[in-house]
Amino acid sequence: METNITYKQEDNSLDYLKKKGKFYKLIIDENTPNQQMFRFDDRNIDEFKQRIVYYDKQNNLKEEFYLKGINNLIKKNNLLQLSLQLADNLITEEEFEDEINNNSEKYIISVQHVTSVNQLYILKDIVKKIGKEFSVDEITEMFSLSFNNLDKVLNQ
């Protein structure tokens, strides 16, 4: 049997949920932002906590990919600016190489292997939201991920 309850945010609703010891599904009504509705059944609160932890980890991983993509874009722009300075003879090849060697964190994108199928699903969602098709090399550069071990990851 499923029951719906509606409460206002001012109510100490988290304590209420703990007392009930039931599983609740949060529904946010966009028309009334100060109200939230929970549905619960006979599952226990531990399953609810596990789901929250799972979705929190998913969001953290997604955020890491977004930040990695932005930081790698900055590195790519830094390298492009340095390359333009070299092309315009504003710096010598020796100065160019010294700058890269002395400040590699500003220019070099380090790549790590994909370690889980979960990463692939999250990347798929991010790329879908961007709305452009990317090559494997572009994805590697954007998110610092190597797909060389993809067979191993898919067979986990």
Image (cartoon, helix red, strand yellow):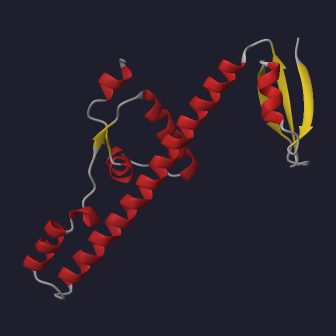
Q: Relative to residue 3, is residue 68 depicted above or below?
A: below
Vertical placement of 44 versus 32: above or below? above
Q: Is residue 151 above or below residue 99?
A: above
The x and y percentages for residue 86 are 18, 81
Placement of 113 over or under 91, stated as above or below: above
Residue at 37% across, 22% down: 154
Residue 25: % across, % down: 77, 27
In the rendered image, residue 151, in percent from the top left (x then y), is placed at: 31, 24
Compared across the picture, whether 129 is left or right of 99 comes to: right
Total number of numbered discs in the rendering: 0
Q: Is residue 64 left or right of residue 46?
A: left
Q: Quadrant of the C terminus?
A: top left
Q: Quadrant of the N terminus?
A: top right
Identify the residue shown where x is 91% and y is 20%: 3
Asked if residue 133 can be seen in this view, the reply is no
Q: Residue at x 90, y 48 (%)?
A: 31
Which of 128 and 133 lies nearest the eye of the viewer?
Answer: 128
Q: Residue furthest left?
A: 94
Picture residue at 31% right of the left edge, 71% below the top:
78
Depth check, front residue: 78 or 60? 60
Q: Give the percent coordinates (x, y) of residue 147.
A: 31, 36
Confirm whether residue 18 shows in the render.
Answer: yes
